[in-house]
Amino acid sequence: MIGAISNVLSNSTLANIAQNTATSVSIETTLKSIGRPGFILIDNNISPDTKKYAATKEFLYQATCLAVYLALIIPVFKKGAFSLAKKTFFKNKPEFAKFTNASEYLDYYNLASKNITNRKATLMKDHSRNKFMHDGLREELQNNVKPEKYPLIKGTIELGSLIGSVFGLAILAPQISHYTIHPMLRMLGMEKKEEPKNPADTHRIDNKV
Amino acid sequence: MGISKTLEKICTSMGNNNKPTYVVMAIATVKGICRPMFTMMDKKENPETKKYTAIREGLTEIIAIPVYWACGEVAGKLSHLFAKPENFMDKKLYASFKAGKLTPEVVKAYENAKVLAENNLPKMNKNLMFMGVCGAALFVIPALCSVAIKPLMNKIQGNKAQKNKVTEIKPQASPQFFGYNSQIRNNDAFRNVRSVYRGSDSGMRVGGL
């Protein structure tokens, strides 16, 4: 049993996910969007209507966060950080010149994290036959047991993702949800449109009409 | 030290060791500052309601930050339990090793397993940290918030009259959009694991994600 757990825990792909800000935040948000409404729904101590309302609201909030994150934060901040660093802060760094964009570097990083046998096997596959044919990157991956991973580039991408995650999930997503959740709940028939609270106000409006 | 040098240092450090706790703690910190600020900026709300909501939001994130850190670190420390040679070698060979039958085959297998365990320790550490953070977001923080927020709020609010006033606040009137109505409030949150989600009028949206 412990051996099986150890095998799972030593999985390189999982370790890459754990160290990848964008992927780990996406997974956490997905887990929350399923887990939190799920926990509300299996609670027998509250009324079915309340459960349904609270679970839907929580799901919609987490789903909004995930949508904002996937649609805006990953493409803009993750990729933008690499481009910005390459053009401004680290324009003289030779490692940045080796990669055209963040995706190419991340492909390289994922391969470099694998053991040499798996790495060579992946490089021989059709989709990777013509990859990394410049700047000695392919040789580095094929011949070195521990190839250079260029932590500066990795860190730049992670810092960009971190800033994007903070902006997206702490500032942007709550504001977007503020305007979208209640209309969505009304569309699903779980909330009624707010009536004017003061009858006098209604009367005044009617008079004006 | 110029901005570029500082940035390079931060990025290299993040590239070498990006802990899953960094991003969630950063999000919780920004949420802890921005959300109470947004709440206080809402001109439509009653000042007392705003104050109550802002303090509660701040407290929620104040609880979330150390919990994320602690859960990540504690889970990460568990990697030493799994990164042992016996988990990376054949059971029969390990039994022979334990029984003292040190044949060349057994010794070689043990040495290989020892190297594997050492190499896999950082991966296991990161993977467990990630799991710890997910656990904190899904279970620990909502549970702690449902138990701690109310007494803390009562302490902060001070006198009973103020306390009574506060309990009358309807979540609908709250400037935050993801508050639940009073029907799902729970004062006995630890009755079972599921109830962690039932009672927390703060726990469902805690943790920054």
Image (tube, coloured by chain):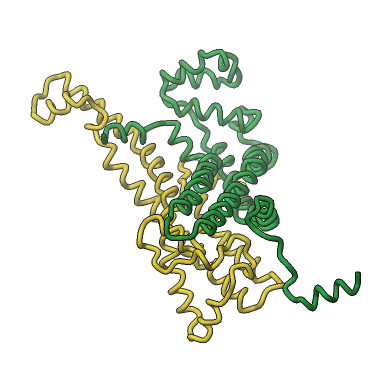
Q: Quadrant of residue A115?
A: top left
Q: Is residue A175 above or below residue B157?
A: above
Point 66% across, 38% down: residue: A75
Q: Nearer the viewer, residue B16 or B33?
A: B33
Q: Does residue A154 sit above or below B164 in this rendering?
A: above
Q: Quadrant of the N terminus of chain A?
A: top left
Q: Quadrant of the C terminus of chain A?
A: bottom right
Q: Is residue B103 visible?
A: yes
Q: Colour of chain A?
A: green
Counting from the top left corner in percent of width and height, residue B193 is at 37, 56
Question: Where residue B135 sits in the image (x, y, percent)?
Answer: 41, 49
Which residue does the image show at 58% across and 31% down from the upper left?
A95
> A188 or B37, which lies in front?
A188
Q: Residue at x 62, y 67 (%)?
A: B172
Q: How many marks?
A: 0
Say if residue B28 shows up in the picture.
no
Q: Nearer the viewer, residue B132 or B50?
A: B50
Left/right placement of residue A131 relative to residue B80 reads: right
Q: Residue A39: x, y in percent?
A: 45, 52
Extreme residue in the right direction: A209
Q: Which chain is yellow?
A: B
Q: Position of residue A132 (x, y in %)?
A: 58, 20
Seen in the picture, residue A200 relative to B91 is either above or below; the reply is below
